[in-house]
Image (cartoon, rainbow, N blue to C red):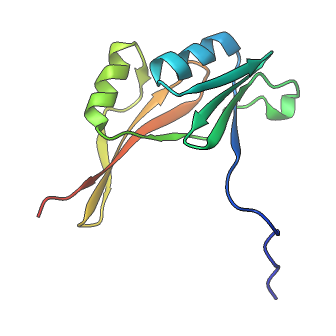
């Protein structure tokens, strides 16, 4: 027996990312990554990810004070994004490398730290030349 889906769920509204220093985190996500900053309310800061909000938050409850999920930021040119962020002192764990190829597209990624203990990645899907 299957359970019906929750009525009215139509997509993702917001992702929360725990941080330790809200000002440092805002500067990183706004000035280094270049995400559109929406607003800040105390220890909460909001960014727009093409209609999905990214919430940076200093957790008040220990239950939520842990590294966040990996965010994979889509970029049109991985090498360009990687070099620009490296030039701003971003701590990359891995240089751009191919993750997967299905014969039509290749998926390339470069993983980095955000200064708050969270690991994220830049990602590009590149058509395979025929």
Asked whether, in this view, residue 84 is left or right of residue 114, the answer is left
Q: Is residue 5 above or below residue 10?
A: below
Query: Residue at 56% across / 13% down in the picture?
Result: 27
As drawn, the residue found furthest toward the bottom would be 1
Q: Is residue 36 above or below residue 77?
A: above
Q: Position of residue 104 (x, y in %)?
A: 25, 65
As drawn, the residue found furthest toward the right would be 61
Query: Residue at 37% across / 39% down in the picture?
Result: 75
Q: Is residue 108 above or below residue 56?
A: below
Query: Residue at 56% across / 18% down in the picture?
Result: 115
Query: Residue at 70% across / 47% down in the picture?
Result: 13
Q: Position of residue 77 (x, y in %)?
A: 28, 38
Q: Is residue 69 visible?
A: yes
Q: Is residue 21 visible?
A: no
Q: How many marks?
A: 0
Q: Position of residue 30 (x, y in %)?
A: 54, 20
Q: Which quarter of the rendering shows the N terminus? A: bottom right
Q: Which quarter of the rendering shows the C terminus? A: bottom left
| Quarter holding residue 15 | top right
């Amino acid at each position: 027996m299957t359970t019906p889906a929750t009525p009215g769920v139509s997509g993702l509204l917001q992702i929360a990312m725990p941080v330790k220093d809200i000002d440092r985190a805002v500067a990183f996500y706004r000035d280094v990554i270049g995400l559109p900053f929406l607003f800040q309310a105390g220890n909460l800061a909001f960014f727009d990810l093409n209609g999905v909000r990214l919430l940076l938050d200093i957790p008040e409850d220990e239950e939520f004070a842990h590294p966040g999920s990996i965010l994979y930021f889509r970029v049109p040119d991985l090498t360009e994004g990687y070099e620009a962020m490296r030039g701003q002192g971003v701590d990359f764990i891995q240089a751009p490398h191919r993750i997967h190829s299905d014969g039509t597209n290749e998926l390339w990624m470069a993983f980095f730290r955000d200064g708050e203990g969270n690991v994220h990645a830049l990602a590009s899907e590149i058509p395979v030349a025929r």
